[in-house]
Structures are given as C-alpha cells and as structure tokens.
Image: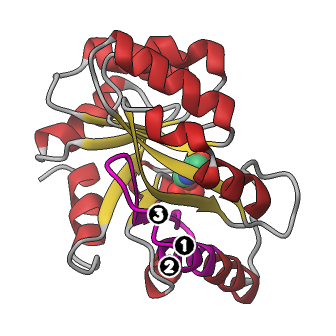
Amino acid sequence: MNHITEKIKEIEAKLPAGVKLVAVSKLKPVETLMQAYEGGFRRFGENYVQELAGKFENMPKDIEWHMIGHLQSNKVKYIAPFVSMIHSVDSFKLLVEINKQAAKNDRVIDCLLQVHIAEEDTKTGMSEEELLEIINADQLKSLKNVRILGLMGMSTFTDDLYQVRREFKSLKKIFDDVKSMGKASDNFSMNEISMGMSGDWPLAIEEGSTMVRVGSAIFGSR
Ligand SMILES: *Cc1c(COP(=O)(O)O)cnc(C)c1O
C-alpha cells in the first residue's frame, strides 16, 4: 500500500459511519492524486477552476470532484460538465449561474451553501441573513438543475481549539435552525455539513460534521 493510501485509510478508519472524506488535492500533481486513486480512493476536493478542469481531463472518469474554493460566476461553465458537488456557493447569483450551466449540460449539480462562521473576517461565506434570503427566495423552487444538500463552513486559522469548536457549533446551530424551518423540497434539504480540515477534523466530527475536507494531513504540506 502506498504512503498516501495509508494516510487516507488511517483517517477513514476514524470516521463515524456516514461521514465522508474529501481529500483536498489542490496544488498537488496528478501523479500524487493517482496514488490515492490506485489505492481505491475516488473523492477529491479542489480550489481552483483551471486546476480542477485540468485534473478532470487527465484522470480517470470515475472520480467524484468537489469544488471547495471560492468560485466566480463566469468560471462555472468550465466545471459544470463534470463537478459532483460545489461546497462554496456564497451568493444567489452564483447559484443561478450553476443552475444555468448544469441545465446546459443536462445535469443536476449538488451544492452546499457556504456560511461565514470564522470570527476572523478574512474567510469567505455568507452571513446568516444572506443564507436565509436564499432559502426563502421564491425563485429557489424553479432552479431544477441544482440540489442544495446542506452547509459548508471554514473556521478561523488558529491554535485556539475552543474558538474553532465554537465556530463549528455555530454552523451546526444554523444547520439545525434551517432544518427545523421545514423547507425541504426536491432541490433543497439539510443533510450535509462540510466542516473540518487537517488540523481540526476530529473536533468537527464531534460537532456534527458529515464531510471533512482534509488536505495536508494526507498529501503533505503545500
Ligand atoms: C485547502 C483547503 C482545505 C484543506 O486544508 P488542509 O489544512 O490542508 O487540510 C479544506 N477546505 C478548504 C476550503 C480549503 O481551501
């Protein structure tokens, strides 16, 4: 078993049933991702559109590609033909564009709404108010080519694990509040919470994460 696969199996062995690992492979070459692939792994997360499209072109087609980085509306068209899930939906405008490009490709694209939970203000994502605006928008029902499955959040980059835990708790609370609004429909449900990275994924799971996005703990530093 190769080294990358060993790391992945080590993490997967600690994940509760139903929690998925997204291996964040940004800035790593195809050969490195292929080690994970050869070990049977199929779910990768990328941050940059051009890099993601290039890796899709050059790798086997049974891979689940997750877009986790900030996404500009004018670049959605490059990933719409193949992307499995977009974690970083941070505006209604972007959601509408994803729907449009998904329709062109005769697909339905799974999305998560990214919420700003970090106490530092450098991290992207919507405020709770913006989130509620999207959820309550009449137009949402007409977006048949996207399927909102939950929320994504990024914690502050800090050694203070109390703070990180507090931020994860705040995302879980928003998730629970939205869920209890009872708005579930064909293209909207609250099933997934994408939170937790290399330094804090065990904590994120304790706080209710269903998808952890782990990069450097698998592939090494960037
Ligand atoms: C880079 C990145 C990760 C992974 O970070 P690591 O600390 O390397 O595990 C997770 N989520 C997002 C949004 C990222 O940009």
Residue under label 3, please give it.
Answer: 183
User: Could you tell me residue 216's position as x and y percent?
Assistant: 50, 53
Q: At 74% from the left edge and 77% from the top edge, which residue is drawn?
A: 159
Mark positioned earlier in the residue sequence (1 or 2): 1
Q: Are marks 1 and 2 in contact (CB under 8 Å)?
A: no
Please report the bounds of the magenta region as a residue range: 171-200
The x, y position of residue 145, in whole percent, is 37, 29
The image shows residue 31, relative to residue 162, as above or below, that is above
Camera-nearest residue between 36 and 175: 175
- Which kind of residue does numbered mark 3 sit on? Lys
Tell me, yes or no, whether the two marked residues, 2 and 3, touch with CB atoms within 8 Å: no
Q: Nearer the viewer, residue 74 or 198?
A: 74
Residue type indicated by callout 1 = Phe
Query: Where's residue 53, x and y in %?
Result: 41, 16
Disc 1 designates what residue?
175
The Cα–Cα distance between marks 1 and 2, rounded to whole angstroms, is 9 Å
**Amino acid carrying mark 2 in the image:** Ser
Question: How dense is the environment of label 1, judged by Cα within 10 Å: few (below 14), some, or many (20 and up)?
Answer: many
In this figure, which residue is indicated by the disc labeled 2?
A: 180
| Residue 209 shown left or right of residue 119 in the figure | left
Residue 179 lies in the magenta stretch = yes
Name the spot of residue 139 as percent of width and height, x first: 57, 36
Distance in Å between CA atoms under marks 2 and 3: 8 Å
Q: Is residue 62 above or below residue 138?
A: above
> Going 31% across and 31% down the picture, which residue do you hit?
108
